[in-house]
Image (cartoon, rainbow, N blue to C red):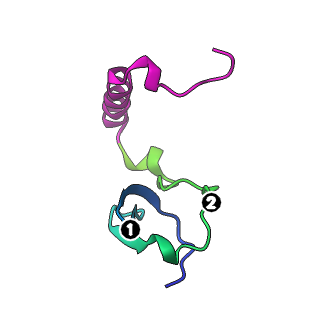
Amino acid sequence: MATSSPACPRREEGELLVLADSTGKEISIPKKDIQARRESETSLMPDNFGEAIPVEEFNHLMRFCWRMERRRRPSDWPKVGNL
């Protein structure tokens, strides 16, 4: 099955790569069947995300994401610029 649809890697399970599509549906693909992998130039986030979620809910989501990021150990944080 050839596909070029955007999907996010979720996890690897033995010889399978488990991806999630834009609806959250998981797709398992045998690693041996993958010819190439590349980073997508587009996001799985809907283009109208800013219009689809009320401002207050967006603020709650951002606060939640920020708190989740802060729970990670500093050694796990991504390197940014020269910091």
Judge whether 72 appears above or below 38 on screen.
Answer: above
Q: In front: mark 1 or mark 2?
A: 1
Using the rendered view, name the quadrant where residue 53 is placed: top left
Using the rendered view, name the quadrant where residue 82 is placed: top right
- Indicate which disc residue 61 carries: none
Q: Residue at x 44, y 57 (%)?
A: 9
In the depicted view, which residue is nearer to us: 22 or 70? Answer: 70
- 40 with respect to 71 (left or right): right
State the image coordinates of residue 72 (x, y, percent, origin top left): 36, 24
- Which residues lie in the magenta part? 54-83
Label 1 or label 2, whichever comes before in sequence order: 1
Classify mark 2: residues with Cα within 10 Å, few (<14), some (14-19) or many (20+). few
Q: Residue furthest top?
A: 83
Q: Residue furthest right?
A: 82
In the depicted view, which residue is nearer to us: 47 or 1? Answer: 1
- Indicate which disc residue 38 carries: 2
State the image coordinates of residue 45 (x, y, percent, origin top left): 47, 52
Q: Residue furthest bottom?
A: 1
Q: Which residue is mark 1?
A: 16
Judge whether 71 appears above or below 60 on screen.
Answer: above
- Name the element at disc 2: loop
Q: Amino acid at mark 1?
A: Leu
Q: Residue at x 61, y 55 (%)?
A: 39
Spatial separation of the CA atoms under disc 1 and disc 2: 17 Å
Contact between labelled residues 2 and 1, with CB atoms less than 8 Å apart = no
- 9 with respect to 80 (left or right): left
Quarter occupied by the C terminus:
top right
Q: Amino acid at mark 2?
A: Arg
The magenta stretch spans residue 26: no
How many discs mark residues in the rendered view?
2
State the image coordinates of residue 47 (x, y, percent, origin top left): 52, 54
